[in-house]
Structures are given as C-alpha cells and as structure tokens.
Image (tube, helix red, strand yellow):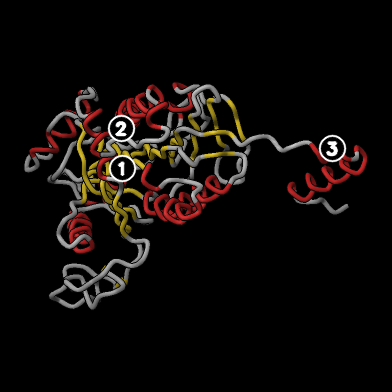
Amino acid sequence: MRLLPIRAYCMAMALAAAAWGGADALAQAPPAPIVVKVVVITTFEIGADSGDAPGEFQFWYERQQLNTRLPFAHHHDLFLNPRTGVLGMVTGEGTANSGSAVMELGMDPRFDPTQAYWIVAGIAGIDPEDASIGSAVWVHRVIDGGLAFEIDSREIPKDWSTGIFPLDSHGPDDSKAKPAEGQIFTLNTRLVDWAYALTRNVDLGDEDHLRSARARYTDYPNARRPPFVLEGDDLAAMRFWHGRLMNDWANHWVRLMTHGQGNMVTSEMEDSGVMVALSYLGPTHKVDPNRVLILRTGSNFTIPPPGRSAADNLAQESESSYTALLPSLEAAYKVGSTVVAALLKDWSVYRDQTPGSP
C-alpha cells in the first residue's frame, strides 16, 4: 500500500470531510497562527531536553517553561510557552542546518513571527586577546569564514601567511578583496547596544577550574579576567578550527572583510546561516531582520595555552568536555534571559518599537 506524505494525506482527509459535511465544513476557517514574541535559537542539545547533561537548549526549555511541543520537520521539534509567546528551537550544528531551520520556521504558516525578536544563544570559541572563557559577547557583525579559496599550507607561496583567502582576491593580503554575497552581516547596532547596556553588569560567576585555566594564559590580560559581558564580532565557519596560526588567520580575515573595522572575538559554526535565512525572509515581511540579537559565550579558548600544542589542546576540547561548557551555558541563559524578560515586560512598547530606536 502506498502511503501519502503527511501534507497530502491531511489535504485528502480535509477534502473528504468537506464533501461529507458540505458547506459547513468548508466554511470552517483554519486556526489563527501563533503570535511569537521571542524566538530563542540554540544549535545543539547533548541528550534529552531535560534532566541530564545540558546542551544549549536545556536551560531554556526548563526555565522558560517551553512545555508545548510542536512537530518540526528538521533537526529537533519546536517548543513553545503559549503564555509568554517564547518559542525555542534547536537548529543542529553548522550553517546548513541553522540556515535551513530558520528559513523553515520563518515560512511555517502555524506561526506569526512578524514582530518577533530572534535571539541566538550559543557557545563559542573565544579569543584570549579579547575575553576569558565563560564571558558573554553581544555580536555586532557576523563574518562567514567558509566562502573562500584554499590552498594546502604545504603548497602556498613562501611569503603567504595562510592558504585560505577570499574568493574575490588574489591572495590572503589582497586589500581589494570584497566579501561575497551573504558573507558579512551587520546587526542592528542600536538594538545590540541596548542589550549590552541592559546586561553589562550581569554577574556571570566564577569557578576554581576557570581560574586555573585562565592562569595559564600569562600573556593575555583579558583572558585572565573573571567572566564578563562585552561586545564584539563573530566568525562563522563550518570547520572547527583551533590554534595560534588559525587564530591569526581568523583575526586577519575579519579585518580584511570589514576593511579594518572588525575584531574577531568569537568563533562558531552557525550564525551566518541564521543571518542568510533571516535576510532572505526580510523582504517577505514574515520577519524583521532588524530584530536579531546574537549572544555567544566562551566555552573554550581559540588557542592553546603556552606549552601545549594545538593538536593536544584540540583533542582535549570536545562538545561534551569544553573547559567552560557549563559556565558558558549558564552565561548564555543568564544574559539572554535578562533581555527576554525585558522584552516581555514592556511588550506593549517593544511590539511596535524596537529597543534603541531613536
């Protein structure tokens, strides 16, 4: 027996019901879409959504009471608090997963996200030049690091610092290089500054194992600080890179793509996918790309401490054992939920007026 796809099956049943029930059945209007106030975007969950070792989603699921499950034909079902209008999603890792999941949600007729705020709350590698593990970074720019030419490092010219360079360039130091379409995104500066001002004094706590890890970064004053909230730029790439030479590449890449204005603070694997989807959805008026916030918290440093190789340090850092995994997850929730609470508290204002607007 041939099985109909879910949508085709539902349509067939609806038509059969209409034929059986006549005009009364046809007159029944579809349910009104669910008005979403805030979409919390996370990228992975380690196991169950509650009660075990947490990933990015678990604290949001438990503490925001996202108890209404909504089937979603992607990596992970959606979860809603119908009382508050907060919707939580897990996209899956990588730009392909994040972009397709956000696009699917934006086009889903069950929801009305036209006035929603979209908040990415995820962990990241963090540059010790700028901040310490456990810190929280409100992102101003997202720069994609995957769209590139690449020559193996064993074959590059002797005067090249790296074999990874922009598509529209003739090498890693080509000052005329231009970002490809969908390679750089600047968030609403006023909104980002508002979120930072609201959360800059949030106490992120500290722990002995964080102090011990920080103490090894003797040449990096910001890396030795207790966790704090800051603003910075964000590099998205499908490869989980690590090490001093790759960190030099990442900083150079961001400076090159932003004509010297950007500073890479965090490194992750999803945010350019999120921004591509939201930018394409913007002209449809289904979402407002000016209502996007990206919060990344440092689960691990992007370079090893003195005396340890990049390979050894990377082997130690994995999804289930990042040096600051739990503190970074807590930081993402503490800082991100402060903004969510503010948006909900004054929704009568923020429904129509974006925070920070003149």
In the structure shown, which secondary structural element does the residue marked by tag 3 occupy? helix
Q: Name the residue tied to disc 2.
A: 328
76 vs 161, nearest the viewer = 76
SS label for mark 2:
helix
In the depicted view, which residue is nearer to us: 144 or 316? 144
Residue highlighted by disc 1: 124
Distance from the alpha carbon under mark 3 to that under mark 1: 51 Å
Residue 214 occupies quadrant: top left
| Residue that numbered label 3 is attached to | 25
Taking the spot 33% from the left edge, 32% from the top edge, the residue there is 332
Q: Residue furthest right?
A: 20
The amino acid at mark 3 is: Ala
Badge 1 element: strand
User: Which residue is pictured at 14% across the width and 38% down the height?
Assistant: 223
Mark 2 vs 1, N-terminal side? 1
Residue 116 image-quadrant placement: top left
Q: Is residue 77 visible?
A: yes
Q: Are marks 2 and 1 in contact (CB under 8 Å)?
A: yes
Please tell me whether mark 3 or mark 1 is closer to you in this view.
Answer: 3
